[in-house]
Amino acid sequence: MTWKQSDSNADGLLNMKEFKTFMKKNNENMKKRWGESVKGTRKEDEQWYGAYNLMTPGKEGVSMDDFHSARDILRRIMAMK
């Protein structure tokens, strides 16, 4: 639901502005659900957007599949520590 609310042009991809909206809403949801969340800075959100945007070369924007794939990769990296 948060993804669709953030995708203002309803193209299935989040551009930078939409991604920042998504991150803000996602952090608010996490805080409601667990009582806390890690809120990134504007620069960090831009860096995350850049990283997620690399998931599908040649396509500008972050899809939900890109987001989930990157999240799974990050979870595996964190489990290796």
Image: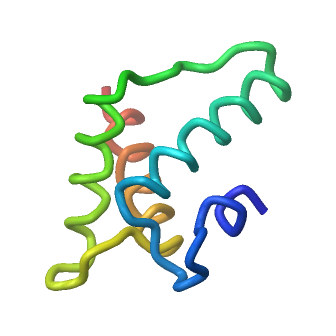
Residue nearest the observer in this picture, 65 or 81:
65
Extreme residue in the left direction: 58
Tell me: residue 77, above or below residue 34. below
Q: Quadrant of residue 10?
A: bottom right
The picture places residue 43, in percent across and down from the top left corner, at: 26, 29
Q: Quadrant of residue 52?
A: bottom left
Please state if 11 lies on the left or on the right of 2 as rendered: left
The picture places residue 60, in percent across and down from the top left corner, at: 25, 76
Residue nearest the observer in this picture, 15 or 3:
15
Give the image's coloring scheme: rainbow
Q: Residue at x 15, y 84 (%)?
A: 58
Extreme residue in the right direction: 33
Q: How many marks?
A: 0
Quarter containing the C terminus: top left
The picture places residue 24, in percent across and down from the top left corner, at: 59, 36
Q: Residue at x 34, y 72 (%)?
A: 61
Please state if 25 lies on the left or on the right of 24 as rendered: right
Q: Residue at x 45, y 67 (%)?
A: 14
Tell me: residue 46, above or below residue 66. above
Tell me: residue 48, above or below residue 29. below
Residue nearest the observer in this picture, 18 or 73:
18
Tell me: residue 49, above or below residue 3. above
Q: Quadrant of residue 28?
A: top right
Please state if 69 lies on the left or on the right of 35 as rendered: left
Quarter containing the N terminus: bottom right
Extreme residue in the top direction: 35
Q: Residue at x 37, y 45 (%)?
A: 74
The picture places residue 31, in percent across and down from the top left corner, at: 75, 22
